[in-house]
Amino acid sequence: MHRSSLALLGAVASVIAFASSAQAYEGSFFLNPPDGGARASAQPDADQTSVDPGSSAPAYATPSYDQTRPMASPIPREVVAYDGPYAPGTIVISTEEKRLYLIMPDHQALRYGVGVGRPGFEWSGVKTITAKREWPDWTPPAAMLRRRPDLPRHMAGGIENPLGARAMYLGSSEYRIHGSNEPDTIGQAVSSGCIRMTNEDVADLYDRVKVGAKAVVAR
């Protein structure tokens, strides 16, 4: 065989080998990034969030909402028909469905996906929205600190805060409707009793709901 033919065959073999290694690399990158970075995993509850208990407040300014927009809900919000007894402006939460309904005029409701209390942390009742906060601080309650003594006693609002972008406080209880940076937990029973939403959805609800609004939690 001529020397030029041997050189051509060698070049073809090199291209095939390179393509095979590139394909293998691409597959390994999808499963395990070469830089050692890990894929985001769901942390099922605020009192299971990994934080440094010795850290000070986050060293950044209050973030803009745009920083949370990639965290889209796996359950899109939508307008649905409503023929129940509650007046427009009422929030109705079905923990069984894992859905929150904001009652609207003309027999309609805006439906959102939510995360609800995990087994042992379920509850029901009627509360009033007593306060609203943007990028709220988080102070874990005493019961949570007994379960997780490693948690910080206080955490300033921000991207890493388990309460997310907005919070609406339910009566004098420790429960809130709040945001989350873990959209894959929406539609699950994962919390310690709070109602969690994606940051995008909670910001939408926050702008629609007034202090004094009724919130009905039904099991």
Image (cartoon, grey):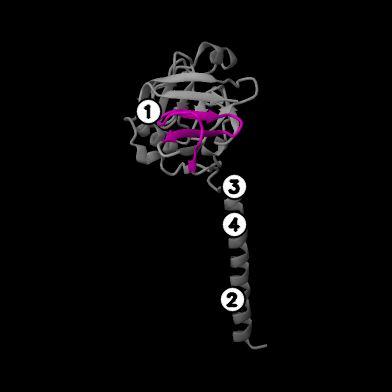
Amino acid type, mark 2: Ala
Whole-number angstrom distance, CA of label 4 to CA of label 2: 21 Å
Whole-number angstrom distance, CA of label 2 to CA of label 3: 31 Å
Q: Position of residue 30 (x, y in %)?
A: 58, 51
Q: Position of residue 104 (x, y in %)?
A: 42, 36
Say which label, 4 or 2, has the lower sequence index: 2
Q: Which residue is mark 4?
A: 25
Q: Residue furthest right?
A: 1
Disc marking residue 32 = 3
On-image quarter of the N terminus: bottom right
Whole-number angstrom distance, CA of label 1 to CA of label 2: 59 Å
Mark 4: secondary structure? helix
Residue displayed at 34% across by 34% down? 63
Do callouts 4 and 2 mark residues in contact (Cβ within 8 Å)?
A: no
Residue displayed at 59% across by 71% down? 15
Say which label, 1 or 2, has the lower sequence index: 2
Say which label, 4 or 1, has the lower sequence index: 4
Amino acid type, mark 3: Asn
Disc marking residue 29 = none
Amino acid type, mark 4: Tyr
Mark 2: secondary structure? helix
Q: Magenta residues?
A: 80-104
User: Relative to residue 186, is residue 218 depicted above or below?
Assistant: above
Viewer-side residue, 92 vs 16: 92
Disc marking residue 135 = 1
Camera-near label (2 vs 3) is 3
Mark 1: secondary structure? loop
Left or right, 96 with respect to 58, comes to: right
Q: Position of residue 139 (x, y in %)?
A: 45, 17
Q: Which residue is mark 2?
A: 11
